[in-house]
């Protein structure tokens, strides 16, 4: 088996482990509504984080861009597929942690996540695929285009639904009343 096949096998195995661990944690495979949709855009919907994609997909694309940059700095001589496998390992680990009772409860304290119950396995795996998309974009695009893409995603999603990766991290570390008030003004 050549290096390329090994790397893709590792990626597939990591995603399989992600799905199986989430299943063992009691996560549902698909939305309990019984349907699979390509997109859910209502930030207040019970289907948020349950379908293939949603507003938070942009955050996972940004994860991929950030992982690509960080791993390129830390492991400049490593083959890109090895760096991708490492990024998938990080993302899969985060997806598992994100669906732990402690993190779900921490998210519920945020203004926009009061009803958050965790991700479906389908959504979690889609988030990992979105990270891989961001990683690939960072590899293929000039760095200025990549930085522009991150800004467009963060500012755009922030303006449209009052949440994004930056606000998620800030609110996870410390609750800011001004940010929470602004987020609660998001259109219901």
Image: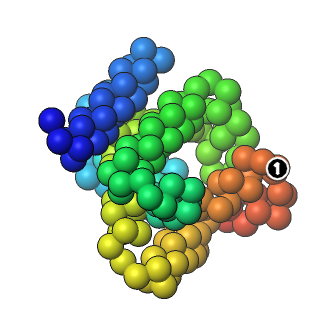
Residue 133, by quadrant, is bottom left
Q: Quadrant of the N terminus?
A: top left
Relative side of 183 to 73, left or right: right
Question: Residue at label 1?
Answer: 174
Position of residue 159 relative to residue 118, above or below, is: below
Q: Label 1's element?
A: loop
User: x, y percentage for residue 127?
Assistant: 40, 47
Residue situated in front as seen by the camera: 129 or 163: 129
Residue 107: in sight, yes or no?
Answer: yes
Residue 38 left/right relative to 173:
left
Residue at 37% x, 68% y: name it. 139
Residue at x 74%, y 52% (from the top left corner): 171
Provide residue 82's location: percent of width, then percent of height. 37, 47
In the picture provided, is 168 more to the left or to the right than 4?
A: right
Residue 73, quarter of the rendered image: bottom right
Which corner quadrant holds the C terminus?
bottom right
Q: Is residue 130 visible?
A: no
* Colouring style: rainbow
Question: x%, y% of residue 122?
Answer: 32, 37
Which residue does the image show at 61% across and 65% down from the upper left?
162
The residue nearer to you, when weighing 1 against 138, is 1
The foreground one among 28 and 146 is 146
């Amino acid at each position: 088996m050549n290096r390329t096949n090994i790397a893709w096998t590792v990626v597939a195995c990591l995603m399989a482990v992600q799905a199986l661990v989430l299943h063992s944690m009691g996560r549902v495979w698909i939305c309990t509504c019984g349907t699979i949709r390509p997109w859910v855009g209502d930030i207040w919907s019970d289907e948020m984080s349950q379908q293939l994609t949603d507003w938070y997909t942009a955050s996972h694309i940004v994860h991929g861009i950030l992982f690509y940059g960080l791993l390129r700095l830390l492991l400049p001589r490593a083959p890109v597929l090895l760096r991708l496998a490492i990024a998938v390992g990080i993302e899969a680990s985060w997806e598992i942690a994100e669906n732990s009772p402690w993190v779900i409860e921490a998210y519920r304290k945020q203004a926009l996540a009061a009803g958050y119950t965790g991700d479906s396995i389908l959504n979690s795996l889609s988030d990992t695929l979105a990270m891989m998309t961001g990683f690939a974009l960072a590899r293929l695009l000039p760095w200025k285009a990549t930085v522009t893409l991150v800004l467009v995603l963060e500012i755009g999603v922030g303006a449209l639904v009052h949440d994004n990766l930056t606000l998620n991290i800030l609110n996870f570390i410390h609750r800011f009343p001004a940010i929470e008030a602004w987020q609660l003004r998001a259109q219901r």
